[in-house]
Amino acid sequence: MQENIKKYKEDLKKLISKGELLHISMQYECYPEEIKKSLGEKSEETLKVLPKFNEEYQSWYSEVKVLIKQLLPDRLDDFVRYYEKPKPRKDISFENYRIEDFLQGLNITRGWEEEKVVGPDAAIPQFRQQQAVLKAVSARFESSLFDIRQLVQADIFDSELSAAQELLKSGFVRASGAVAGVVLEKHLAQVTANHNISTRKKHPAISDFNDLLKKGDVLDTPSWRQIQRLGDIRNLCDHNKEREPTKEEAQELISGVEKFTKTLF
């Protein structure tokens, strides 16, 4: 988990830095002379490396959206709202102009003199708010409660998966699968709690958590199917079935659980 947190911090740093450049690019499109002046002697150098907002914003938005969905899900709707045009929208004003409008170069004018009502510069505050939400994710890493709970749990899971691997090497196939299955069930329970998803079942199983996470848009269909497969192997290891689980199946279970404990939060 420490490696995961380090990776997320590095990704955050890159996305925040790119967002700052996109912000300058956005401002430059609206106020080229003012931005050149504010950059001073470094204006030419900075403008050369500026990303083109219309070309690079969407990839930045998609990456940040996934990150916020995983680490700060309660702010996801806010982040998306700053981008998407509100529906319904009878007229367009400074208050409801969005980044999506900016990307389309939308200008609203009035009368035969084409007096400006609202234009692309109205999207700048919306992008600033998106940056603020992204930066709020960083604060999550500074929370001692987040670090302690997640790190301690991750260390326990790593130890249990190592034990499962040793059991498999020693030929205890069922036992290794059973241990890995417990880790998966505990981790899915934690992920469900992280996303404030509740269940009415008193003792939910892997399949229950899996379905809840898919329904809550935390899991995509391929991941849901893979976890379903891992749950089937766990059941084969836990209960007397018509056949014994194979070493390959137990290894698939252990490897799959290790993957999800390090990528699903």
Image: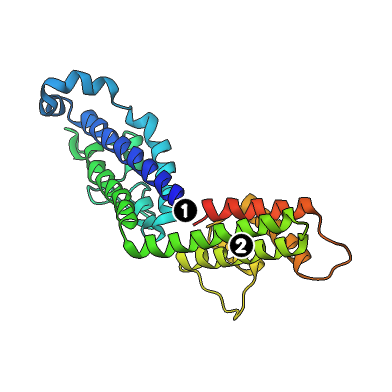
Whether residue 66 is visible here, answered yes or no, is: no
What separation in Å lies between label 1 and label 2 (alpha carbons)?
15 Å
Q: Where is residue 234, by image quadrant?
A: bottom right
Q: Between 236 and 122, which is closer to the camera in this rendering?
A: 236
Kindly report which numbered mark, 1 or 2, lies closer to the viewer in this rendering.
Answer: 1
Give the SS element for disc 2.
Answer: helix
Against 51, residue 63 (above or below) is: below
The residue under label 1 is: 1
Residue 128, image x, y percentages = 25, 45
| Labelled disc at residue 201 | none
Q: Between 125 and 218, which is closer to the camera in this rendering?
A: 218
Q: Where is residue 27, by image quadrant?
A: top left
Instruction: Identify the residue at horizontal 39%, vertical 63% (top origin).
Output: 148
Residue 181, image x, y percentages = 66, 64
In primary-sequence order, the first of circles 1 and 2 is: 1
Q: Is disc 1 surrounded by few (<14), some (14 to 19) or many (20+) residues within 10 Å?
A: some
The residue under label 2 is: 184
Q: Between 60 and 186, which is closer to the camera in this rendering?
A: 186
At label 1, the amino acid type is: Met
Would residue 238 be found to the left or right of residue 132 on screen?
A: right
Residue 238, image x, y percentages = 75, 69
Colouring method of the image: rainbow
Would residue 89 be found to the left or right of residue 38 on screen?
A: right
